[in-house]
Amino acid sequence: MRWNMIVLASCLATAGCVGNSMSERQDANIQSSLQYDSVPCDQLLAQRDGLALQYHLSAEAKPTFSNPAMGFGPFTPDMRSKAKRDADQATGEIDAMNRSIDRRDCGHPDKQKKLALPG
């Protein structure tokens, strides 16, 4: 029994060291929204909606993270299907696009700027 535990522990350690761990790949899904700040608002909205439609996601999708037991996150191999990994990557892109859209107030009509005295 003890031999089995030693083999299992070494397999988990090896699986986590090759860049294939669940937590490492989930962290890679988070993207910076700054890369989308140079994209015009209408094009960014269309790109976000197209990506959401392609992967059957909400336009307000946010990345999710698994909760591995007892701190084994870096050693838990990523066993998600390719379709699930692609959808999770798209979720990270959609979230980054939404943060850029919110920061730049895209999708909201321009507020009229009038010169007037307060009051």
Image (tube, rainbow, N blue to C red):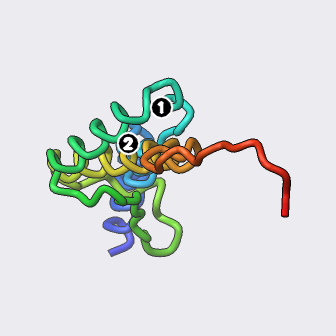
Does residue 41 appear to the left or right of 118 in the view shown?
left
**Residue 20 visible, this orientation:** yes
User: Does 44 appear above or below 7?
Assistant: above
Q: Which residue is drawn at 44% across and 26% down?
A: 39
Residue toward you, 78 or 39: 39
**Residue 24 visible, this orientation:** no
Q: Is mark 1 on a helix, strand or loop?
A: helix
Quarter of the rendering occupied by the N terminus: bottom left
Does residue 79 appear to the left or right of 118 in the view shown?
left
Image coords of residue 102 (percent x, y): 53, 50
Instruction: Give the label on residue 99, or none.
Output: none
Q: Mark 2 points at which residue?
A: 93
Image coords of residue 32 (percent x, y): 53, 38
Q: Identity of the amino acid at label 1? A: Tyr
Does residue 101 appear to the left or right of 6 in the view shown?
right
Residue toward you, 24 or 98: 98
Quarter of the rendering occupied by the C terminus: bottom right
Q: Residue at x 52, y 42 (%)?
A: 100
Mark positioned earlier in the residue sequence (2 or 1): 1
Cα–Cα gap, marks 2 and 1: 10 Å
Q: Is mark 2 on a helix, strand or loop?
A: helix
Q: Residue at x 66, y 43 (%)?
A: 113
Instruction: Give the label on residue 36, or none.
Output: 1
Of all residues, the one furthest to the top in this rendering is 38
User: Does 94 appear above or below 66?
Assistant: above
Q: Identity of the amino acid at label 2? A: Glu
Q: Residue at x 36, y 47 (%)?
A: 94
| C-beta proximity under 8 Å, tags 2 and 1 | no
Does residue 31 appear to the left or right of 7 in the view shown?
right
Question: Residue 104 lies in what quarter of the image?
Answer: top right
